[in-house]
Image (cartoon, rainbow, N blue to C red):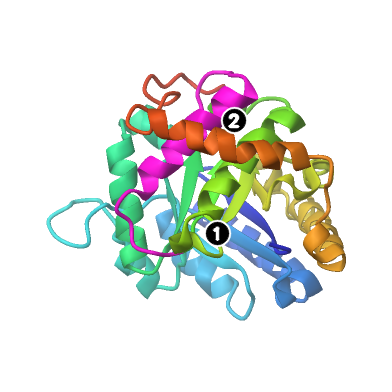
């Protein structure tokens, strides 16, 4: 796809008033941004639950999408502290972040829980933001097998609907720099092959998170459909730099049409089918998140 996605998770870094100020500052910068307004760049933000309503209000009249950082696996009932996908949709959220490494590490969420939450989100018309990634540093091919197995597990039994796949190698979250470009290309190509060959996932995107910042989209070219930012985006002007970079990449993709931007990774794309097919043998035993490891202090996507 020519559209480029830029996402931001605020985690629990902002208090309520700071979050409201950030929403206003970002909205002022992107409200008349041609690429965001025209859909060439899709921007989404996942704040805390208490900040969802102010975010929806602040970004009203823009194309910015708001999501929750989690969602219940249940539709309704006696589940204290939970928020359903239907309620998120009711207040104007359109995305739910699911399966993040911190949810797995800190709260013991399993592949089965991730799949149940994915099903719940799609039942309510919410786009799952599926966080995928190996905990240990592996070869690109092995990491691709792990990632594809996780993705297939998350989508098992789910209704049709587009998803946003956020590839975040856990060992790169909070690191000084992202995973290597070739590593990202191999894994992203395998994930893209998986969603592209699933008729139920038309319109899905594969983005990269984990020490992502300015320059990464330009370097990766056509390898990913966007980036998922953490604390780098706490400064609105810094976020706008990545949005501008995404706009330039989207324009280049549109101009080049089917030939797309990066011809260099073509051998990676050709090998993606083999990697994706190889993942089926481990789909029942996905590696990489079974034994979570602690992320670096202050880690964020």
Q: Relative to 63, is 244 above or below? A: above
Q: Is mark 1 on a helix, strand or loop?
A: loop
Relative side of 45 to 288, left or right: right
**Which residues, given as a range, are shown in magenta?**
134-161
Q: Is residue 33 visible?
A: no
> What is the x, y in percent for residue 265?
78, 40
Of 173 and 248, nearer the camera is: 248
> What is the x, y in percent for residue 278?
49, 31
Give the class, few, some or many, for how many residues have Cα within 10 Å of label 1's Cα (few <14, many ≥20): some
How far separated are the C-alphas under marks 2 and 1? 23 Å
Q: Which residue is drawn at 77% across and 42% down?
A: 266
Q: Name the residue under label 1.
A: 204
Q: Name the residue under label 2.
A: 173
Relative side of 264 to 38, left or right: right
Q: Residue at x 28, y 42 (%)?
A: 113
Q: Relative to 225, is 20 above or below? A: below
Q: Which residue is drawn at 38% across and 19% down?
A: 291
């Amino acid at each position: 796809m020519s559209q480029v996605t830029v996402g931001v998770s605020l985690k629990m870094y902002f208090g309520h008033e700071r979050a409201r100020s950030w929403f206003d500052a970002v909205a002022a910068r992107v409200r008349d941004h041609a690429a965001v307004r025209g859909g060439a760049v899709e921007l989404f933000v996942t704040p805390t639950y208490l900040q969802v309503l102010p975010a929806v209000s602040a970004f009203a009249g823009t194309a910015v999408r708001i999501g929750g950082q989690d969602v219940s696996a249940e539709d309704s009932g006696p589940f204290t502290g939970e928020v359903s996908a239907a309620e998120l949709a009711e207040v104007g959220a359109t995305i739910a972040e699911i399966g993040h490494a911190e949810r797995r590490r800190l709260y013991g969420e399993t592949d089965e829980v991730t799949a149940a939450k994915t099903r719940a989100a799609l039942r309510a018309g919410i786009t799952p933001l599926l966080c995928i990634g190996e905990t240990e540093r592996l070869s690109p091919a092995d990491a691709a097998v792990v990632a594809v197995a996780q993705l297939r597990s998350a989508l098992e039994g789910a209704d049709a609907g587009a998803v946003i796949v956020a590839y975040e190698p856990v060992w790169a979250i909070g690191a000084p720099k992202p995973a290597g470009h070739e590593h990202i290309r191999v894994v992203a190509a395998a994930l893209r092959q998986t969603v592209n060959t699933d008729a139920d996932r038309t319109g899905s995107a594969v983005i990269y998170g984990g020490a992502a910042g300015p320059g990464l989209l330009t370097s990766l070219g056509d390898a990913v459909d966007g980036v998922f930012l953490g604390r780098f985006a706490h400064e609105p002007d810094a976020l706008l730099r990545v949005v501008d970079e995404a706009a330039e990449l989207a324009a280049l993709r549109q101009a080049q049409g089917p030939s797309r931007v990066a011809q260099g990774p073509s051998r990676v794309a050709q090998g993606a089918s083999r990697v994706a097919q190889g993942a089926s043998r481990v789909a029942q035993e996905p590696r990489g998140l079974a034994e979570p490891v602690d992320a670096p202090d202050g880690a964020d996507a």
